[in-house]
Image (cartoon, grey):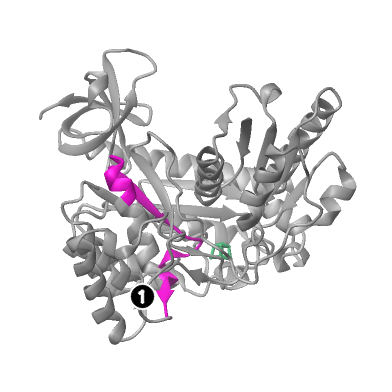
Amino acid sequence: MQYFFETYGCQMNKAESAALENCLQERGWAAAAQPEAADLVVINTCSVRLTAENRAWGRISHFAALKKQRAFIMVVTGCMAERLKEAMRQKQPAIDYVLGNFQKQAFGLIIDAAAQGRVLAAVEESPRFVFASRHEESGSFKAFVPIMHGCNNFCSYCIVPYVRGREISRHPLAILAELDRMAEHQVREVTLLGQNVNSYCWQDGFSQITGDQLSGQAPDQAGGQRTAAQADLRQRLANGPLDFPGLLDWLAQSLAGRGIGRIRFVSSHPKDLSDATIAVLAAHPVFARHIHLCVQHGSDRVLAAMNRQYSVQSYRDLVARVRAQLPDVSLSTDILVGFPGETEADLEATLDLLRDLRFAYAYMYFFNPREGTPAAAMPGQLSTAVKKERLARVIELQRDISRQVMRASLGRIFPVLVESTSRKSDSEVLGRTEQDMMAVFPGEARLVGSFVNVRLDSLRGNTFKATLVS
Ligand code: SF4
């Protein structure tokens, strides 16, 4: 039996698709090279932007047309499935399953039925989000590991809390078990994922976890090192809940010497990035010196309307503390312009913030109202022309700053994780610094998946030309 996946949106969606693919592969399914050959098509959707939903609708219609020529099972999952639920099936009856975010644990039953040529009449919804046990893509040396799910923040423009629900943290032993397994499978870099990782909090005390959460491996089968990690966790939990810095510190100590050379995390909400977290990052070099810290805007008035729950000054102070503790850190951010009621002065404040804080890069967008969020109904909506013109000014400035920030690294030596061979030349490879800068340099394909040191010699576009030094 063969399957085909299409995934839209964030890293969390990609990790969740990898978990569903693992479920298929464990049952003997294989990836189809072409969707036309698949017995099962899964479309994992995103609701953050209307354009992502429209793209997914286009693909659903395409697969519905294919179904008229040959039979296969079509599953639509992810945030759009959660948002629209049965309305999706009414709009497109060719969909066999609309699987919301709290129904993914039923995927095993769905594919068992599909293997027998059956379609289940109904799929149960779990009262709590259920984390999959394995999110690794087979053969990959980089992986994404969800540590929490959902969001309590309700930024006024964002649909995530409505489709992902309230924050729930994953059992620390389940996180460690997954990282252990990845280390055994030669994964060298992991990214801890959550809508707001800084608010990770395990409050349920110490408890063993089930074999299922551990991918079939009981904690005491994992050897003496794991016993020590459990004893350490039990001790920490005796003193109260395990928060994000506590989790990072425990993971760094428990994973030492296991082969995972770099740990990243996204997304970070500025109001929750604590001094304790900064101190833990500074204490453990395994954490990459890069933080994506979404500021969104440079005007207090707009930040308040966005319900971001921090001020521009508190964000500036946070950046200063991060840079003081982590001198090699690079910071990136998100900027959202054209929010309802934004004035020229608000935009100027945002440009000033970019000039002052000099982010390495930024993801920049203009406001697009999302149906069902408070901001969509706010007065003072701006025209698309104004939003585009303001965004262009922000992009132009940040592009300039990014180049200046990158140029400041020329001549320096950085460790990189080699990610692939170059598309342009077989004799060159592409590596990523912990600061999230890309460098291309002469090297053999066997280096892919290993850490090497390179000197950054020159800059072409957003990629450095470099030389291997060890
Ligand atoms: S922090 Fe705000 S922008 Fe991020 S997921 Fe939560 S509500 Fe959305």
Q: Residue at x 28, y 47 (%)?
A: 183
Q: Is 196 covered by the magenta stretch?
A: yes
Q: Is 335 covered by the magenta stretch?
A: no
- Given the image, on which type of amino acid does mark 1 rest? Asp
Q: Is residue 223 above or below residue 418?
A: below
Q: Quadrant of residue 318?
A: bottom left
Tell me: 92 left or right of 150.
right
Residue that label 1 marks: 243
Image position, residue 380 (x, y; %): 74, 63
Specify few, some or many for label 1: CA neighbours under 10 Å numbering under 14, 14-19, or 20 or more.
Answer: many
Numbered disc 1: secondary structure: strand
Q: Is residue 215 above or below residue 397?
A: below
Residue interval drawn in magenta: 181-203
Which of 138 and 224 lies nearest the eye of the viewer?
224
Quadrant where the N terminus sits is top right
Count the marks: how many? 1
Q: Is residue 81 above or below residue 166?
A: above
Tell me: 21 left or right of 82.
left
- Is any part of residue 179 visible from this angle? yes
Q: Residue at x 62, y 63 (%)?
A: 164
Image position, residue 333 (x, y; %): 44, 53
Which of 34 and 318 lies nearest the eye of the viewer?
34
Q: Quadrant of residue 209?
A: bottom left
